[in-house]
Image (cartoon, rainbow, N blue to C red):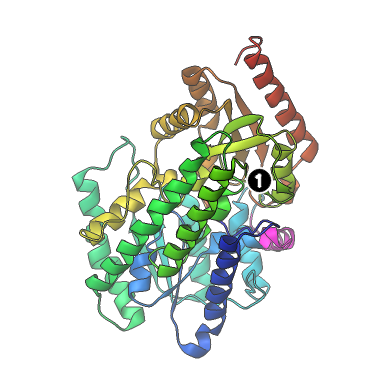
Amino acid sequence: MSAVVPVQKDASQRRQKAMLARHFTRLAEAPETGDKCVYTFVPGNLTELLLSFDLLPVLPEINALQSSLHGRAREYIGLAEKLGHSEDVCAYVKSDIGMMKSGNVGPTGQRLPNPDLLLLSYTGCFTFLKWFELLREEYDCPIAMLHVPYQGEGRITEAMRDYVVTQLRHKVIPALERISGRPYDEARLQACLALSARAEDDLVWVLESAKHVPSPIDAYFGGVYYIGPIFTAFRGTREAVDYYHELREEVAERIGLGLGPVTPDGEMDAERYRVVLEGPPNWSNFRQFWRMFTDEGAVVVASTYTKVGGVYDTGFRHDPSRPLETLADYCMGCYTNLGLPSRIAMLERYVRDYRADGFLINSVKSCNSFAAGQLHILREVEQRVGRPGGFIESDLIDPRYFSASNIKNRLESYFQMIEQKRHGGGTA
Ligand code: SF4
């Protein structure tokens, strides 16, 4: 869920930056152009459906993480806490509330429009619900809720799919028709979904390129940048298709040249460790955090966070031939909507398929959706793969919970543990 732009920019990175800039400009101009805006969250977002009504998505989580990357989150979080929001509340919410109370100026320095609708796809996080309750009080605008059943049994049943499709048909679509003033156009939605599937093919190819040794990409620190367009306002657009096509070509070229990932400091030196990473990144000290890995020659070859807005590497693609059913399956398949057994199986598969030396968990204070059960995940995956697991703690965007020395110490010990394991000593 990101629009992070590393210092060294390839053509695809420049393209992504321009796409985002155009989107934020359209948002800023919405009060004059009359474009209608829908606030919605990343996991389970219905971007293609919104675009089929010519509605503009606004993603508060992205604004919160961007506020962090631009050094504003501390101030916004502080303001929200002064207004009575507890220290324990997810920092994304507090950053968003603080930004709104400070004039609702987004990451490009332009004012964000007020929502015409709050569209909540409820995918496993109770905080989403409370967040939009707060925004509804502020904006006095309509709210539509899509209740997405949790995948407790690790599979989607016909009854679950029907339940979501019924809500889409009878609650969400009528709400979108009301605010856009136009009828549902299924052919248009299908055209968007076909574009989604093309972009998804290329995204999966890029993420799976990390199976190469050396990996041409970092699937976490670079990966959060790759998922930017598809997890936000661009899934279902030709712009996204072009972006992922260009990105794929760049990565293919890197494989051909035997190159490792591009980092903020340039080309990475030799790959020494391959790790899988579970949990969101730390945005407040993103580059510093990344450098702790590159300094050790560690590459993240697969991550669960890059599945938070859609799990595609198990074969799911948006399917235009069954438009509402495919939206339902997409929502139910997002990472935050999966139970612990599914998450454990995913990590186990990643460690094996990506030939990782081990896996790390970055447990962030803010996010219960991710953090619940992570110690159990640690033990279980270690046992199954017989490779070392490591545990670090920080936060998404609250800089008070980033202790550089603690994290660096833990990472150094972790990489030493991998070395010991390689040389036949120590235990996982
Ligand atoms: S608790 Fe986690 S999933 Fe929920 S809003 Fe906060 S960051 Fe997102």
**Is the C terminus in the top left, top right, bottom left or bottom right quadrant?**
top right
| Image spot of residue 220 (x, y percent) | 58, 44
Query: Which quadrant holds residue 141?
Result: bottom left
Mark 1 secondary-structure assignment: loop
Task: Say what amino acid the circle numbered 1 marks.
Answer: Asp
Considering every residue shown, the one lying at the far bottom of the view is 32
Residue closest to the eye, 36 or 306: 306
Q: Is residue 280 left or right of residue 292?
A: left
Residue 234 in the image: state x and y as whole percent: 45, 66
Q: Residue at x 56, y 51 (%)?
A: 224
What is the total number of numbered labels drawn onto the structure image?
A: 1
Q: Is residue 326 left or right of residue 353?
A: left
Check the image and report above or below for 77 versus 261.
below
Percent coordinates x, y for residue 28 in the rendering: 57, 80
Residue 29 vs 50, above or below: the answer is below
Looking at the image, the residue that sits furthest to the front is: 257
Depth check, front residue: 279 or 159: 279
| Residue where numbered disc 1 is placed | 395
Residue 120 showing in the rendered view: yes
Q: Is residue 414 magenta?
A: no
Q: Quadrant of residue 113?
A: bottom right
Instruction: Classify mark 1 as within 8 Å of ligand 1 or not, answering yes or no.
Output: no
Range covered by the magenta-colored residues: 67-85
Q: Position of residue 398 (x, y in %)?
A: 69, 51
Tell which of 202 and 307 is nearer to you: 202
- In the image, taking residue 132 as reference, residue 282 lies left or right, namely right
Q: Is residue 285 visible?
A: no
Q: Is residue 75 magenta?
A: yes
Q: Residue furthest top?
A: 425
Q: Is residue 40 left or right of residue 213?
A: left
